[in-house]
Image (tube, grey):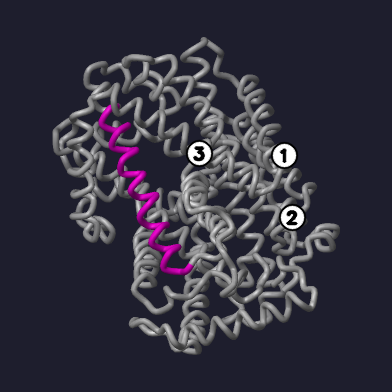
Amino acid sequence: MNDSSDSNNKKLSGVFKVSVIIVAIIVILGAINPTQFGAVSGAISNWVSNHFGWYYMIITSGMLFFCIFLIFSPIGKLKLGKPHHKPEFSTRSWLTMLFSAGMGIGVVFYSTSEPISHVIAPAVADAGSDEAILESIRATIFHWGAHAWGMYGAVALALAYFQFRKGESGLLSKTLRPILGDRVDGPIGTFIDVLTVFATVVGVAVSLGLGTTQVNGGLNYLFDVPINITVQGIIIIVVTFLFLGSAWSGLSKGIKYLSNLNMFLALILLLAVLFLGPTMVILNMIPTATGEYINTFISKTLDAAPLNSNQNEWLQTWTIYYWAWWLSWSPFVGIFIARVSKGRTVREFVLALLTVPTAIGIIWFTVFGVTGIEMAEQVPSIIDFGPETQLYAIFNEMPLSIPLSILAIILVSSFFITSADSATFVLGMQTAYGSLRPSAFIKIVWGIALSSIAFILLLSGGETGLEALQSAAIIAALPFSFVIIMMMYSFYKDANKERKHLGLTITPNKHRLKEYLDEEEKKYQEQKDAGVDERDL
C-alpha cells in the first residue's frame, strides 16, 4: 500500500479536524472554569475507578498474559513486516527508544516520591517498618514493570503486524478490519481514531506538565528561581523550540539521538546515586526486591482486595490508577514502538519489550527508592517536599549535590523533548491518514498544541489542572480499553490464519518457512525490478 504522504498531507483529514475541535473545547472549558472542570472530571474518574477497578485488573492481566502466550506460540515466528524487511534501527537504539518513549519523565519524577509514599502509607504493613520498606520497592516496581509494557505491547503488535505485514495504514482503526470489515473506513473508524488522538493528547500533556513543574522545582531549589506560571511558560517555550527542531529533523535522526542521549544521562545519574548513596543496602535490595516481585507476581496481579477496605482504597489510589494511566498511554506508546519495530519477529519484540524495560525499572526504582527512603529517615523534612522538588532535596543531602541536581534537570528536559517529539509524530501520523511521513506542518501544529495545552492547564489551576487532565486520561482509558480488546482478537484471528497458511508449529518449520521466504523474495525482486518504491514494498 502506498504511503503517499505527499498527497494525503496536503488534505487535512477528518480525524485531524474533529480532534483539534475536541481538544480546543476541552482546553477552553478548563481555562474558563478550572475549579469546576477539575471537580467534574475528578468525580467522573473516581466513579470509573470505584466501579471498574475490577475490570482494569482483569484487562491489564489479560493483555500481559496475551503477550506472554505469544512468546510460546507459533505466531511468535511471524515477522512484523514482509520477509525481506530488516530492522531499521540497531538493537541498542531500538531498546533505548522503547524505554524513552514508554516511560520518560515519569521515571525521574516518581523515582523517590512513590517509594517514600508507600513507606509512609503502605497497603498492608505497618508504616515505617522494614516490611513497609520492602513492600514499597516491590509495589513501585510492580506499577512500572511488565504490566505497563504488556499493555503497550498488545497495541503495538496489532499496529505493526497490520501496517508492515498486511499493508494497512498506521491507523488503529485499520487493525480491526478482520472483524469489522470495510466499516473501519467509515464513521466507526473515524471515531476510533479520534479516541486514539484524544487519549494520546491528554496522556502526553500530563507528562509535559509534570516535566515542566519538576524543571521549575529544580531551578527553584538550586537557584531560587520562583515557582510560577511565568517561569513555567518560559520553560515550555524553550523546550518547544527544541523538540520541534527534533521533530523537523525526522524520526530516525531526532528521536534516535535523543533516546541514546537519555539513556546515557540516565546511566550516569543512576551510577552516581548508586555509589554516592547507601550502596550496600541498594545492592542487597536489588535481588531481594526482584525475588519479591516475581514471588508475588500472580497474587498481586489478580488481587482486588474485596474484603480489606484499607487495601482496596490503596489499590484505588495507586494500582488501579496506574493501570488506567498506562491504558490511556498505550495508543501513544504503542504507535511509536510499532513504528520503530519494523522487521522484528513477534517473539523478539515481546521478549525485549517485557524483559529489558522491566529489568531497567527494577534497578532504577530500587536505587532511587532505597536512597530516597534512607535519606528521608535521616532528614524527615524531606517528606514535606512535593514530588517535583523531593528528588533535589534528597540530592542536597548527598555529595556532589549540585552536579546531580543539574544532571537531573537536563535528563528531565531531554525526556520532555523525546516524549513531545514522539507524540508529534504519533499525532501527525494518526491525523494524516496513517502516513509514516506526516508533513512538518501537521507535526508542528500538534507540537504547539501539546505545549499550549500543558501551559493552559498549568495556568488554569496548577496541580488542579494536572489532576483534571489525569482524570480525563482515566476516563478516556475506559472506552479505549474495549478497542484494545478488539485489537487483540483481530490480531490473533489474522495472525493465526497466517500461521496456519505457513504451516508454522511450535516445533521448527525450516523447510516450509524457507519455501515461503523464497516465494516472497521472488515477488519482492519482481516488484523492485518493476520500479516500485522500496519504501512501499
Q: Which residue is mark 3?
A: 467
Q: Residue at the spot x=67%, y=33% of the render?
A: 242
Q: Which residue is mark 1?
A: 448
Q: Are dots 1 and 2 in contact, CB under 8 Å?
A: no
Q: Estimate the x, y position of residue 432 in percent, counting from the top left.
A: 74, 59
The question of residue 354 being in magenta is answered with yes
Q: Secondary structure at mark 3?
A: helix
For the residues carrying marks 3 and 2, which lies nearer the camera in this image?
A: 2
Tell me: 478 left or right of 288. right
Q: Residue at the spot x=68%, y=59% of the render?
A: 430
Q: Nearer the viewer, residue 336 or 204?
A: 336
* Highlighted range, magenta: 345-371
Label of residue 438 in the image: 2
For the residues carrying marks 1 and 2, which lies nearer the camera in this image?
A: 2
Q: Name the residue type under label 3.
A: Glu
Q: Could you tell me if residue 51 is visible in this image?
A: no
Q: Quadrant of residue 124?
A: top left
Residue 132 drawn above or below residue 173: above
Q: Nearer the viewer, residue 412 or 113?
A: 412
Q: Earlier in the sequence, mark 3 or mark 2?
A: 2
Q: Residue at the spot x=66%, y=74% of the render?
A: 167
